[in-house]
């Protein structure tokens, strides 16, 4: 499967699918519990909440920065 990082295999696609699913579920839960964005970010820290992404290189920048941007973007969408 072509993507920003080139050809992706099944395992990489499954990791991406799992990340998207788990990130959305975690942020929905955080909003339901009334957590702040900062509390949600701490609860969904990349290395702790998504250990299956260890070693996966992002398209651009650091994995931590990309994850923080993903959290913020989804958080804004859920606020609408």
Image (cartoon, grey):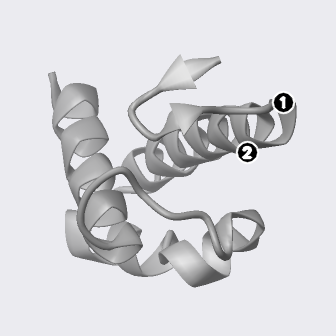
Q: Give the x, y percent position of residue 29.
A: 53, 47
> Residue 20, can we see it?
yes
Left/right placement of residue 27 relative to residue 21 reads left
- Marks 1 and 2 sit apart, C-alpha to C-alpha, by 9 Å
Q: Give the x, y percent position of residue 74.
A: 30, 38
**Tag 2 secondary structure:** helix
- Residue at 78% across, 32% down: 9
Instruction: Identify the residue under disc 1.
Output: 10
Quarter of the view holding residue 25: top right
61 lies above or below 54: above
Residue 15 is marked as 2
Binning the other alpha carbons within 10 Å of mark 2 as few (below 14), some (14 to 19) or many (20 upward) gives some
80 lies above or below 44: above
Q: Give the x, y percent position of residue 40.
A: 38, 67
- The outermost residue toward the front is 6
- Residue at 24% across, 75% down: 38
Left/right placement of residue 65 relative to residue 44 reads left
Chain-order first, disc 1 or disc 2 = 1
């Amino acid at each position: 499967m072509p993507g920003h990082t080139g050809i992706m295999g099944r395992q990489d696609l499954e990791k991406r699918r799992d990340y998207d699913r788990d990130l959305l579920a975690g942020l929905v839960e955080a909003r339901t519990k009334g957590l702040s964005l900062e509390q949600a970010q701490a609860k969904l820290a990349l290395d702790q909440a998504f250990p299956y992404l260890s070693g996966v290189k992002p398209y651009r920048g650091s994995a931590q920065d990309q994850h923080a941007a993903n959290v913020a973007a989804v958080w804004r969408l859920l606020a609408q």
